[in-house]
Amino acid sequence: MSKNELVAKIEALNEWEAVIEEAKAEAEAIRDSIKAEMMEHDTEEMTAGKYIVRWTSVLSNRFDTTAFKKAHGELYKEYTKQSASRRFSISA
């Protein structure tokens, strides 16, 4: 692949990523308007045609690694493992 082809691919990638971000923002705005409608009706579930929309509260328990690391540093080190991955990035 020539440098010109590579530049063209990078520019096309940048354009598509901008379109994706715009679409994500639009989807989030639509999602927020649906949530606002549900809040207005004070409900966690609504039916609209063939769709059932739920916006429910969920409780979850998560392990606080930061606090555990502070309280039990050596034990934390014993049970951590290193992982390797590759990161793709383009900068101008």
Image (tube, helix red, strand yellow):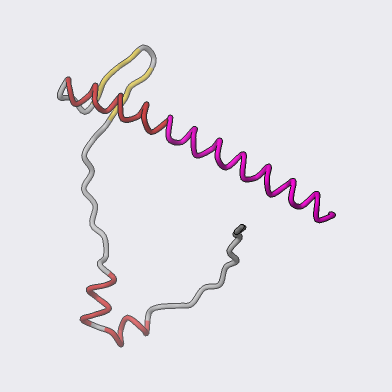
Q: Quadrant of residue 11?
A: top right
In the image, 72: left or right of 2? Answer: left
Q: Residue furthest toward the top?
A: 49
Q: Residue at x 26, y 60 (%)?
A: 62
Give the position of the N terminus as an image quadrant.
bottom right
In terms of depth relative to the viewer, which is nearer, 83 or 36?
A: 36
Residue 62 vs 72, above or below: the answer is above
Q: Residue at x 22, y 73 (%)?
A: 67
Q: Residue at x 30, y 84 (%)?
A: 75
Q: Is residue 81 magenta?
A: no
Q: Residue furthest toward the bottom?
A: 74
Q: Residue furthest toward the right?
A: 2
Q: Residue furthest toward the left?
A: 42
In the image, 44: left or right of 19? Answer: left
In the image, 3: left or right of 10? Answer: right
Residue 73 position in % (x across, y down): 28, 84
In this picture, which residue range is highlighted in magenta?
A: 1-26
In terms of depth relative to the viewer, which is nearer, 74 or 32?
A: 32
Give the position of the C terminus as an image quadrant.
bottom right
Residue 36 position in % (x across, y down): 24, 26
